[in-house]
Amino acid sequence: MIAFYIESKIWEFIREIKYTADFVFSTLGFEYKFITKFSQLQDNDILFFYGPTEPDETDLHYLAFDKIMFYIPFEPSLYKPKGLNKEQIEEFTREINFFQSLPAISREDFDEPIYYFKDQNIFLGRYNFDIFGNIFFNLSGYENFLAETTDDFDRIPDDESVFLENSSFPFVNGFLWLIERFLQDAIKARGNVLLIKKETWPQAEDFAAVISHNINKLQKWSFYAIFKNTFEDILCFYKIKYVINNFISKMKYILTNIEEYWNFDVIDEIEATFNINSTYFVGTESEITEDIDYKLNDDDLLNEIRKNLANGNEIALLGSINSCKDDLLGKQKELLQEITNRNRIGVRQNLFRYDPEITPEYHHKYSFVYDSTRSFLKRSGFKNGVAFPFHVFSKRVPSQKEKIFFHRGCLEIPLTFSDTILKLSKFKTISLEKAKEMISSIIEAIQNVNGIISLNFSISNFTEIKYLKQFFSDTLKEITDKNVFIKPYLEIAEWWNKRNSVVVQIVNDEISLYFPDNLDNFTIRIFGDYTVFGLKNDDMSLEKNQFFFSYYEKDKAYEIEGAKVNLKADRIFFSDIKSDTNLKIKLSKIEPERE
């Protein structure tokens, strides 16, 4: 298990540090604990020592004797709003060579991110920069405090983002990859340590993907819109192709009364080809003209909602534009719950309007399962370098009665790409080839760091962007050709929460697993020189539920009470897991081959 020690000198930032450590180790899938005394260390623990003062040689021999220890230097300015200004960040940013460069803020220059010291009894990994502080700085969105300009919703323009040049790669995921890689190096060198990883996705897929559709507009034309647009066409007479297409579109609506934005069937047909389900974000009310242009009780819309639910798609809330600052989401959620007969609802704010101080509090107040609003406004990429689900850090100090100590309950699933960025103007879009390059770059980036990509294709844009049907189909083909876990948002969020609730314990050479929930699939990975010797459930009297191996067949599923188990190299795959299942896995040490 990971044992995380926070030096008492930095307890001023205890909430921020615990929030970051929880994100790091829970996301990586390692069981961890916070310790306040070194006497709490167990034999198989891996110690992370976090503080401004590196232990001296005497302390190292005491703390790290026959163990693995990592020391991380603490940089307080990364935990303070406005702890650094933009000029200092630019001055202190060092590039770590990775698949792509990772921007690390450090006052001290360094050549390598970590230094190793090892002898017969000690393994020490010393980080050369505050990797936890860097992760917190990006997760918390503290860059908002550095912006010279913000919009009416306190969001910073894309070009004000601190690490905009690095946004094509999820560099926070890269930091987590480094932490896991350094752990693997240490375990391989030490030889007597065992660590279990809960794989990020159910069957150890390379990455996850989620597809969504904002139902922002369903009505392209009305008689008022036709009247208004006619004058616009006269002013834009030089855009001959645009004017002709508009005229044909108007005539089609007048003669047939067909709504051009009603593209449910188009989306259904493409998604059925690739056997995937997606999430539709539906609005419930409109306060201003930029909001939705439909009524939730429209019979045709209700039929589409029911059909999509029956087909396995998800219906989530598209929060009205003003709901990011005003207390409106409770009523809107209730309206959608009545229509869908679903209690667990996710949310996205319309036009991606999001106040980082206020909006998360409303998401928490009304118990939304997840939010998927955080994104760049006019470009694709990984906002703040994050491509994992995460909980938003709460800057408000909680009362003693509150259960959530450092974050709000709603899970944030960042949005990586929205098709609105394909439109350069009312008359022009980027080319199909450039759009494909953009998506391919996103997929390539995420494959290397095991995260999630979240893509939005608004229902109205299947009319407005002429190549969007082809682009959407090509995108789904490229994604589904990979080793990917692709589900609607709610299923991604529920998987994430269920994965985190699985309890893994190690006693000597035995792994105990407790599954509180039903799970279709779950995978663990063994770090250390161990192999599986036996499987059993908690009931020792059930002989059929005990297996002991001199070897095991790679493709055979062993039936055990509460689950099926497959064993392949250093991974164990579980399937058809029933809730309240306890399993034990007996390991045996792999002895090094004699020369």
Image: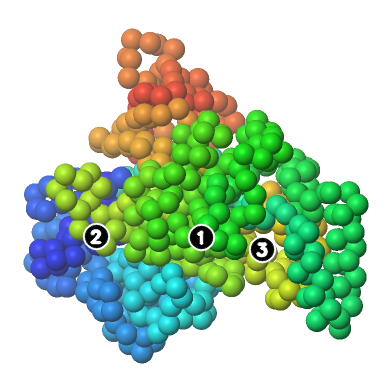
Residue placed at 47% from the left, 43% from the top? 333
The type of residue carrying mark 2 is Arg
Q: Element under label 2? A: loop
Residue that appears at 21% across and 46% down = 402
Q: Position of residue 264 (x, y in %)?
A: 73, 45
Does residue 95 appear in this view? no
Residue 321, which numbered label? 1
User: Where is residue 443 drawn, in percent x and y?
Assistant: 62, 60
Characterize the local packing of mark 2: few (<14), some (14-19) or many (20 or more) Cα atoms within 10 angstroms: few
Residue nearer the viewer, 99 or 423? 423
Residue 349 horizontal side relative to residue 534, left or right: right
Height in image: 373 above or below 230? above
Q: Residues within 10 Å of mark 1 (few under 14, many from 20)?
A: many
Relative to 565, is 592 above or below?
below
In whole angstroms, how far apart are the C-alphas of marks 1 and 2? 24 Å
| Horizontal side, residue 213 vs residue 63: left or right | right
Specify whether residue 76 is in view.
yes
Q: Nearer the viewer, mark 1 or mark 2?
A: 1
Residue drawn at 60 percent across, 43 percent down? 296
> What's the CA distance linking mark 3 and mark 1?
19 Å
- Residue 263: image location, x then y, percent: 76, 49
Q: Which mark is residue 419?
A: 3
Badge 1 amino acid? Ile
Q: Secondary structure at mark 1?
A: helix
Task: Name the residue located 88 percent from the left edge and 66 percent from the top edge.
Answer: 247
Q: Nearer the viewer, residue 153 or 265?
A: 153
Q: Are marks 1 and 2 in contact (CB under 8 Å)?
A: no
Can you give x and y, in whole percent of width and height, for residue 381 in the image? 56, 68
Tell me the kind of residue under disc 3.
Asp
Q: Which residue is mark 2?
A: 396
Secondary structure under the numbered disc 3 in the rendered image = helix
